[in-house]
Every structure is written in structure tokens, then in C-alpha cells.
Image: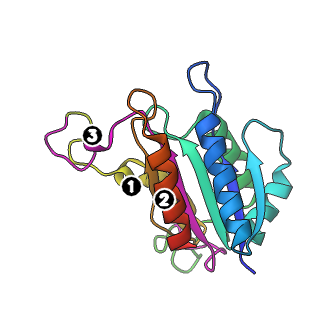
């Protein structure tokens, strides 16, 4: 049986309570449970035990990070989680330090990951419209993709040896939401890649 660890990275703001991200977490858990997957979950709104979180990463075949994109990156609560959990897993659990050796101290930085059989998927919610990405005419992202914007998070997972599944995104969720369409696309995405 496949094992999926779902992390809800939402950070509460008065104008963004987290209902969409939680609904996507619930939909993913429901779809995957129906397909026979075993699920574990963590939410940034709840307390967590650092060592238990490291163990959830070791247990999982796939880590699904469901999160809003705030100020062009991840929420501060998830960044804190990474600082605590990923640092605790650095020396022999999630990875063997940074992958370099005494015999080659300048080579293979980041190649020490122990989760080489695991995959990850980013599922993101944006205020930005889809049209803001992959278009050199657009001011802010200047032709960059969603994955370009989230490159540092891809590198964090790659540092542990994980392989990416295609990223999913809901766009323009505050000003021009298409939530029912997003839910349909999300279900199709989960069915296709899991």
C-alpha cells in the first residue's frame, strides 16, 4: 500500500482563513483513501512533535504539500516547520548531512538525501492569475513559471533525494475564483499522478 503524508502549510490571515487549502487537503485524503492509500496529516495550525514529523517523512512514499503562496513564497509557519523538522533530520535520517565527503569536499553538495524512493507534490493556491506566469510580457514574473517561483522549495525536497510529481495550482482565488473548476482539476490531477 502507498503511504502519503499531507502537510497543510496554510497560515491564517483575516482575509484568508484557510478554507480552500483545508478543503483541498480533505479532497486529497478522501480520493487517496478510496484508492487504498494510507494517509497521515499535519497542519501548521496545530502543534506538532518534531521527531514525529521526521518519522512521517521517513514513512511516506509521497509528501503532498498543500499551501498558499504568500509574498512569493511559503508561509512563515511552514518555514519554521522546515527549520525545526528538516534540521532535526539532517544527520542520518532525512539525509546524511549535505552529501559531501572528506575526500571530495567541493563536490556533490546536496546529494546526501536518504528519501530517494519518495516523491513529493506541491499543491498551491495563488491570488495571482494564471496569466501572470509563463508570459514575458507580464510585469512581475517576467516569463517565469510557478515552478520557477517555488524553486527553493523544490530544492529543499531534492536535498532529501525526493523526486517531484507535477505541481498543481489554483489561481486568482481571491479576486476571480473558479473554485468548482479548481476542485475538478485537482481531482483529475490526483487521480492521474497517484
Q: Quadrant of residue 194?
A: bottom right
**x and y, in percent, of residue 98 in the image:** 59, 66
In primary-sequence order, the first of circles 2 and 1 is: 1
**To which residue does mark 2 refer?**
154
Give the total of numbered labels: 3
Q: Are the residues flagged by discs 3 and 1 in contact, CB closer than 8 Å?
A: no
Q: Quick check: is 112 in the magenta stretch?
A: yes
Q: What secondary structure is found at the residue carrying circle 3? A: helix
| Mark 2 residue crowding within 10 angstroms, few (<14) / some (14–19) / many (20+) | some
**x and y, in percent, of residue 22 in the image:** 66, 42
| Residue 61: image tag | none
Which mark is nearer the camera, 3 or 1? 3
| Mark 1 residue crowding within 10 angstroms, few (<14) / some (14–19) / many (20+) | some
| Residue 132: image tag | 3
Q: Residue at x 32, y 44 (%)?
A: 130
Asked if residue 136 lies left or right of residue 25, the reply is: left
| Residue 147: image tag | 1
Q: Residue at x 64, y 63 (%)?
A: 63
Asked if residue 159 lies left or right of residue 32, the reply is: left
In primary-sequence order, the first of circles 3 and 2 is: 3
Q: CA distance from mark 3 to mark 2?
A: 20 Å
| Mark 3 residue crowding within 10 angstroms, few (<14) / some (14–19) / many (20+) | many
Q: Quadrant of the N terminus?
A: bottom right
- Extent of the magenta region: 110-138
Asked if residue 51 lies left or right of residue 9, the reply is: right
In primary-sequence order, the first of circles 3 and 1 is: 3
Amino acid at each position: 500500500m502507498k503511504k502519503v503524508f499531507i502537510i497543510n502549510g496554510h497560515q491564517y490571515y483575516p482575509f484568508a482563513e484557510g478554507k480552500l487549502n483545508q478543503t483541498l487537503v480533505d479532497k486529497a485524503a478522501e480520493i487517496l483513501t478510496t484508492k487504498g492509500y494510507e494517509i497521515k496529516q499535519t497542519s501548521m495550525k496545530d502543534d506538532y512533535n518534531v521527531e514525529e514529523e521526521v518519522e512521517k517523512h521517513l514513512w511516506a512514499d509521497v509528501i503532498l504539500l498543500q499551501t498558499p503562496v504568500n509574498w512569493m513564497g511559503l508561509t512563515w509557519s511552514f518555514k519554521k516547520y522546515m527549520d525545526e523538522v528538516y534540521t532535526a533530520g539532517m544527520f542520518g535520517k532525512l539525509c546524511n548531512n549535505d552529501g559531501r565527503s572528506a575526500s571530495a569536499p567541493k563536490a556533490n553538495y546536496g546529494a546526501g538525501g536518504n528519501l530517494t524512493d519518495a516523491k513529493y507534490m506541491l499543491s498551491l493556491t495563488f491570488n495571482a492569475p494564471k496569466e501572470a506566469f509563463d508570459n514575458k510580457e507580464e510585469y512581475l514574473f517576467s516569463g517565469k513559471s510557478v515552478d520557477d517561483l517555488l524553486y527553493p522549495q523544490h530544492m529543499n525536497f531534492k536535498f532529501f533525494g525526493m523526486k517531484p510529481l507535477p505541481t498543481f495550482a489554483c489561481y486568482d482565488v481571491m479576486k476571480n475564483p473558479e473554485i468548482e473548476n479548481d476542485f475538478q482539476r485537482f481531482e483529475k490531477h490526483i487521480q492521474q499522478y497517484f
